[in-house]
């Protein structure tokens, strides 16, 4: 414990570098994941796509059960066979995107499906186009649930990004990885504790954002 | 205004939901679609604003085939209220009402003004409710907002799918009466779907009774009640329809519309002559703008030094609204001892009179036609 | 129907990858692991997961149930808050921190050994079980309990005959989630002295040989997916029939 503290005091720039690298990789991944997840989630709620939706959601559900380390391995193989770099930032981001979009996809789909059909019918009956129904009714009502999905996703990604150090990406997994290889308890502790703290802070922040973003009309109780 | 011509809906699996339905709804009329569940009433209504695509026949709105109009455009010009109301929970009452005005690109101030006006119309205080959210309202209040929203841009046509269906019976009756008053003001062409015969007879100018996708009878409530076309209609309106008539018929259906009156300033002799000529002994008195103010009976006019009606008038509070239910009016006549009940519309304007004779005639007619059983 | 296709394709890919990588023979300067190796490591993996989940169930279900009882309402936010926070901490972090704790507790010597690995897995796998047990026991319609009490059931009978059967499906979901997570985390457990498929994967990781990683990763993925499916069928089977019937709207 003491050694870890000493290390931080001696090399603060290293810790900062790992934290930033960790955040950066998550940032890049989550942005792509949100775009993909929300888009795909909206797509599969479309009329006549019930079967596709079922398959996609099931695939997502199963994919979530694949251990992250195993997924990294599979991705490295895939990227390698396509002649791409199978080690470092790229496979890490791809793996994070694959994982990260699943909760977002699932929540987007569920939230849009959960919108009271009477509201949709009322909107359509008043002459809203399908696009207006999506943007004025369905999406605003789904936003809190989608946000919850993004939050789950980010917390998940913080953990997985740690493991990404094993395939050569930078981040807080690096000290853990090095510590284990070289039996340096101080490095292991620094990595483990920092990433835990990071996860808690970001989870807390996301909870705040989630509350902020909920439309006011959904918060007020019924008389 | 709305014309249905052999309107047919066949679903992909071959079920015929609506079968060659043809009739017309006139401007300013409230037409009730009535029938047991699965009779095609909601389907027919939804084909008018094209929420359900038509598969045969035509629907004309003001002479224009509705499939020739862009669906969204069409719907923005037809008010729409449904049983579940479907208020947008993430928007305020005001924003809900402004939905269609926003879609039509109205200016902000004009929208707001309209929302306030509509809230007034449904008797909700704008300053109190406009910024509330639907989840803060009671069921009845939400229903009113639903109606206000349907009237957003003052569309000439209104489609209402069991709009009071989710309300408890007591509030429901009240909302119905209130809505009738609103309709008197706004005079929209309304399609009103219900499966409740009481509601149909109370609300409708005309009723389209449907069964298995077919139009069985399209008639006024009184005719439906007393001149049922076949056994199905008879069964649907019920065996006690003679008495139901009292409860369900509106004064409007039974009253005598064109009726002699006396003016405030008229000479007593003139009025007496008129009464003698008509063979009646009581006349309602109206002021210059047609407002009902009281009554004169022939005994008041004979002899005496009275010059004008004004001197002999008996001011009377006993009167009935034109939309009142017949049994209410009858009970009023019995308790006030009036043989002739003046009937008024908005602003206390005289619209006609109701007599025991007329009620009896109506009931007699019912017995006559209903006795076949 | 389509679900089955999705599932079967996935499992076939995993098995195919395992067979392919194993049949290669030499991977770089390494010999590929043999089927016997893979089998042994799979067995070790399962044993580790089994113990971790078993202890988690034994501890988690009573704990989750206990905090729903009136007397414990004060500590319930503590337990649940702890479970929620714990869940957002990455598994690798817990394992890593566990590895640096060189102390003894009862008969355990923490350090680089299998016991440490199992304890780490148990801690991480405990959370979904506690949370689901709490949620399911807390969600039972009070009218049911009251009518049971009214019919003269004892407190224990109410738990056994009413609450547990009704809560069982959700508790089982917790156990399934916990198992699937543990299968994945167990791969990391070799870092603190655990045994299992992680041994193969990390040989590959440290040697930077993708095919070796796959030799460990593909069977792990296969295990996670198939265990998830098996436990899901148990979940469905265990659900009281009356709860599966959906209320029909007329």
Image (tube, coloured by chain):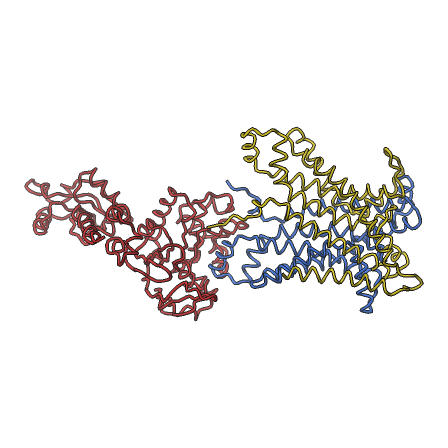
Q: What colour do you see for chain C? A: yellow
Q: What colour do you see for chain A? A: blue
In percent of width and height, residue A171 lies at: 83, 53
Left or right position of B7 against C163: left
Left or right position of C66 against C103: left
Counting the numbered discs, the total is: 0
In percent of width and height, residue C50 lies at: 78, 45
Quarter of the image where the N terminus of chain B is located? bottom left
Identify the chain drawn in red: B
Q: Is residue B322 visible?
A: no
In percent of width and height, residue B46 lies at: 43, 61
Q: Quadrant of residue A186?
A: top right
Q: Residue at x 24, y 44 (%)?
A: B329
Is residue C136 depicted above or below C72 in this figure? below
Left or right position of C48 against B344: right
- Pick whichever, A76 or B171, lies toward us: A76
In percent of width and height, residue A36 lies at: 68, 61
- Pick whichever, C218 or B310, lies toward us: C218
Left or right position of B28 against B315: right
Q: Is residue A199 visible?
A: yes
Q: Residue at x 45, y 52 (%)?
A: B115
- Farthest residue in the front direction? C36
């Amino acid at each position: 414990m003491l050694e870890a503290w000493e290390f931080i005091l001696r090399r603060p720039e290293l810790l900062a570098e790992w934290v930033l690298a960790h955040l950066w990789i998550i940032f890049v991944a989550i942005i792509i994941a949100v775009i993909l997840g929300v888009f795909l989630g909206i797509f599969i709620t479309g009329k006549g796509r019930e079967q596709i939706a079922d398959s996609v959601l099931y695939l997502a559900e199963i994919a979530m059960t694949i251990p992250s380390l195993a997924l990294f391995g599979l991705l490295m193989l895939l990227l390698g066979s396509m002649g791409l770099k199978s080690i470092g930032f790229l496979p890490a981001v791809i793996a994070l995107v694959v994982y990260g979009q699943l909760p977002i996809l699932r929540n987007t789909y569920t939230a849009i499906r959960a919108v009271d059909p009477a509201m949709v019918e009322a909107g359509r009956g008043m002459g809203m186009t399908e696009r207006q129904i999506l943007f004025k009714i369905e999406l605003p009502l789904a936003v809190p649930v989608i946000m919850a999905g993004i939050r789950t996703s980010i917390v998940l990604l913080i953990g997985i990004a740690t493991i990404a150090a094993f395939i050569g990406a930078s981040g807080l997994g690096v000290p853990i990885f090095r510590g284990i290889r070289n039996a340096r308890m101080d490095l292991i502790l620094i990595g483990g504790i920092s990433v835990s703290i990071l996860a808690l802070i970001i989870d807390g922040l996301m909870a705040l954002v989630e509350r902020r973003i909920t439309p006011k009309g959904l918060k007020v109780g019924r008389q | 205004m709305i014309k249905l011509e052999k309107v047919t809906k066949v679903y992909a699996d071959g079920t015929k939901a609506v079968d060659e339905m043809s009739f017309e709804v006139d401007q300013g009329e409230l037409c009730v679609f009535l029938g047991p569940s699965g009779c095609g009433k909601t389907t027919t209504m939804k084909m008018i604003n094209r929420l359900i695509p038509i598969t045969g026949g035509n629907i004309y709105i003001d002479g224009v085939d509705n499939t020739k109009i862009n669906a969204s455009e069409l719907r923005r010009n037809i008010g729409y209220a449904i049983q579940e109301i479907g208020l947008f929970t993430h928007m305020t009452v005001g924003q809900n009402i402004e939905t269609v005005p926003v879609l039509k690109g109205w200016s902000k101030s004009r929208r707001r003004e309209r929302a306030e006006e509509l809230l007034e119309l449904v008797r909700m205080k704008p300053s109190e409710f406009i910024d509330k959210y639907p989840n803060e309202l009671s069921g009845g209040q939400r229903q009113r907002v639903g109606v206000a929203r349907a009237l957003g841009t003052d569309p000439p046509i209104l489609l209402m799918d069991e709009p009071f269906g989710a309300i408890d019976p007591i509030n429901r009756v009240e909302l119905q009466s209130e809505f009738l008053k609103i309709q008197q003001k706004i005079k929209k062409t309304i399609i009103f779907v219900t499966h409740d015969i009481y509601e149909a007879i109370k609300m409708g100018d005309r009723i389209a009774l449907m069964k298995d996708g077919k139009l069985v009878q399209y008639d006024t409530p009184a005719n439906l009640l007393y001149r049922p076309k076949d056994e199905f209609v008879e069964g649907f309106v019920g065996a006690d329809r003679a008495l139901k008539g009292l409860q369900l018929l509106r004064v409007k259906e039974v009253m005598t519309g064109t009726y002699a009156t006396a003016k405030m300033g008229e000479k007593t002799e003139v009025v007496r002559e008129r009464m003698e000529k008509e063979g009646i002994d009581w006349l309602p008195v109206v002021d210059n703008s047609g407002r009902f103010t009281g009554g004169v009976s022939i005994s008041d006019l004979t002899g005496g030094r009275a010059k004008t009606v004004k001197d002999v008038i008996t001011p009377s509070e006993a009167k009935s609204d034109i939309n009142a239910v017949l049994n209410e009016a009858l009970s009023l006549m019995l308790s006030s001892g009036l043989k002739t009940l003046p009937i008024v519309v908005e602003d206390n304007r005289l619209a006609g009179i109701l007599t025991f004779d007329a009620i009896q005639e109506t009931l007699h007619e019912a017995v006559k036609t209903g006795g076949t059983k | 129907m389509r679900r089955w296709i999705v599932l079967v394709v996935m499992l076939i890919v995993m098995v195919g990858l395992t067979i392919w990588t194993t049949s290669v023979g030499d991977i770089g300067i390494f010999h590929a692991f043999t089927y016997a190796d893979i089998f042994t490591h799979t067995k070790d993996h399962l044993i580790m997961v089994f113990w971790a989940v078993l202890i988690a169930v034994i501890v988690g279900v009573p704990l989750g149930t206990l905090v729903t009882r009136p007397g414990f309402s004060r500590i319930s936010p503590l337990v649940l808050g702890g479970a929620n926070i714990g869940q957002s901490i990455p598994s690798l972090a817990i394992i890593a921190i566990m590895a640096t704790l060189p102390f003894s507790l009862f008969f355990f010597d923490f350090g680089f050994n299998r016991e440490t690995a199992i304890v780490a897995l148990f801690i991480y796998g405990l959370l979904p079980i506690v949370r689901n047990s709490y949620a399911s026991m807390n969600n039972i319609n009070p009218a049911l309990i009251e009518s049971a009490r009214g019919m003269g059931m004892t407190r224990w009978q109410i738990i056994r005959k009413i609450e547990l059967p009704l809560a069982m499906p959700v508790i089982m979901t917790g156990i399934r989630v916990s198992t699937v997570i543990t299968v994945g985390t167990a791969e990391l457990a070799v870092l603190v002295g655990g045994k299992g498929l992680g041994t193969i994967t990390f040989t590959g990781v440290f040697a930077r040989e993708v095919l070796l990683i796959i030799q460990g990763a593909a069977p792990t993925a296969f295990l996670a997916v198939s265990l998830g499916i098996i436990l899901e069928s148990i979940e469905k089977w265990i659900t009281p029939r009356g709860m599966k019937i959906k209320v029909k709207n007329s």
